[in-house]
Image (tube, rainbow, N blue to C red):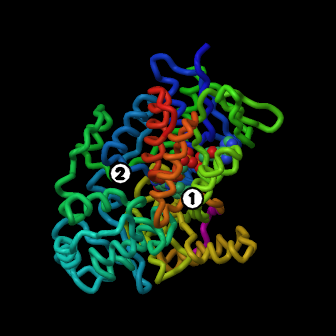
Amino acid sequence: MGRTVVVLGGGISGLAASYHLSRAPCPPKVVLVEASERLGGWIRSVRGPGGAIFELGPRGIRPAGALGARTLLLVSELGLDSEVLPVRGDHPAAKNRFLYVGGALHALPSGLRGLFRPSPPFSKPLFWAGLRELTAPRGKDPDETVHSFAQRRLGPEVASLAMDSLCRGVFAGNSRELSVRSCFPSLFQAEQTHRSVLLGLLRGAGQSPQPDSALISQARAERWSQWSLRGGLETLPQALNTHLTSRGVRILRGQPVCGLSLQADRRWKVSLGDSSLDADHVISAVPASVLGKLLPAEAAPLARALSAITAVSVAVVNLQYRGARLPVQGFGHLVPSSEDPGVLGIVYDSVAFPEQDGSPPGLRVTVMLGGSWLQTLEARGAVLSQELLQQQAQEAAATQLGLKEPPSHCLVHLHKNCIPQYTLGHWQKLEAATQFLASQRLPLTLAGASYEGVAVNDCIESGRQAAARVLGSEPNS
Ligand SMILES: Cc1cc2nc3c(=O)[nH]c(=O)nc-3n(C[C@H](O)[C@H](O)[C@H](O)COP(=O)(O)OP(=O)(O)OC[C@H]3O[C@@H](n4cnc5c(N)ncnc54)[C@H](O)[C@@H]3O)c2cc1C
């Protein structure tokens, strides 16, 4: 009889792992176990009035680089090419990004010429930050916070305005706590290898081998900055579900895994409440802290390393306005923590993807709330009511974008612990986990947003790599 691989978690990472396992020439028996009734994890698209699409999680996927290309390949393999909504390079949502500082929106410079012009809120043209970067010595520490790295190489203004905002936009996190080595590995590596990030990025550009397809070529030719799918990004996990079912993958929904135990024959017993599954190998694509609680006592060192990978919450407030206009056209704006501790930024969904505005069309924006404001309230055990979050988001839309009329439609979701935080020393937690898995030869492989990248592309890649390791019969990751 063939091997059985049980995949824990039906988010995009677990779905991608199952997909790649199921396409092997001699596929193992694959069982995907998901706690909720829905697949897709944080990827969730909801239809509103007039068919408008509201993304409750990710809303755009970047096509750049080898990982971006691999995701596009997956999209084509699933037959979704005609559903893709691209944001082409010449579109305002590709060119314009803003910072909200000092009560005003400021366009971030785009293109080389922009670097030489005065660009408020920065006191000097960003060219000077670039010059500083080119001449700064290489850092000596094995890891550093994003803030310290940016301050050392680019100066205090870029660190406290641009990098602070970027960390809030991508990780909903604090640049003074997040690790540059783990959150922005290409910047860290560029400095290590070439002494300067700018030199490293220039020399390293376009060197990684990339897959090719008609869709990937189109994305390159049209310089897409991101893409979505006509019915929302949840179409991707839905298509994966259909594909997996057709390949004979058993998908169990509404079945939270409640424990893992290793049997005498070194096979896993995966406990599902009142039943269990036997597995030759387990791929875990649940959050690290969840896996930490599922592991048996003999894996306590691994459980400790995994439990130390924490995550933060984000409140996503989707707003739609009838007959309203934005003061600027672009992808959206970010808000540094010094400006507002609670509003991470606002995405102008209608600019990037007007096709999802519904009929009659209405302006869609999404306010992301989080940061120290939310953390403090959560720590105090405060009641985070829908009304409080909606009011906070509407106020931000009114103050920052002039959207003063009440929205015609509003969705409020508080996503608890939704974004893993790669804090200083994250790499050591990964190393401890990898070493334990290798030394114990545990038939367990880790995938998902908790480890090496939170973007959808990173998660899909983690699933692909986990499947490759299992198929290559390597004992673990
Ligand atoms: C608000 C928000 C906006 C984002 N925006 C973007 C964006 O624009 N672009 C981008 O690229 N990325 C974005 N991301 C990041 C990206 O969406 C996530 O990192 C990614 O979807 C995580 O996928 P995952 O499969 O690793 O984890 P998850 O989506 O967390 O999936 C894990 C799954 O495991 C299940 N599970 C948990 N416990 C158990 C258990 N005991 N037994 C069985 N199953 C269990 C869960 O129910 C879940 O389905 C965003 C994330 C959030 C939260």
State the image quarter where residue 29 is shown. Answer: top right
At horizontal 67% and vertical 32% (from top left) the residue drawn is 268
Residue under the point 54% across and 58% down: 420
Give the quarter of the image for residue 118. Answer: bottom left
Residue pictured at 39% horizontal, 69% vertical? 144
Residue 287 or 403: which is nearer the viewer? 287
Residue 262: x and y, percent?
A: 68, 35
Answer yes or no: disc 1 within 8 Å of ligand 1.
no
Q: Is residue 41 visible?
A: no
Report x, y in % for residue 112.
17, 67
Residues at discs 2 and 1 in contact (Cβ within 8 Å): no
* Magenta-span inclusion, residue 409: yes
Determine which quarter of the picture holds residue 244: top right
Q: Which residue is mark 2?
A: 87
Is 340 positioned to the left or the right of 145 in the image?
right
| 460 in magenta | no
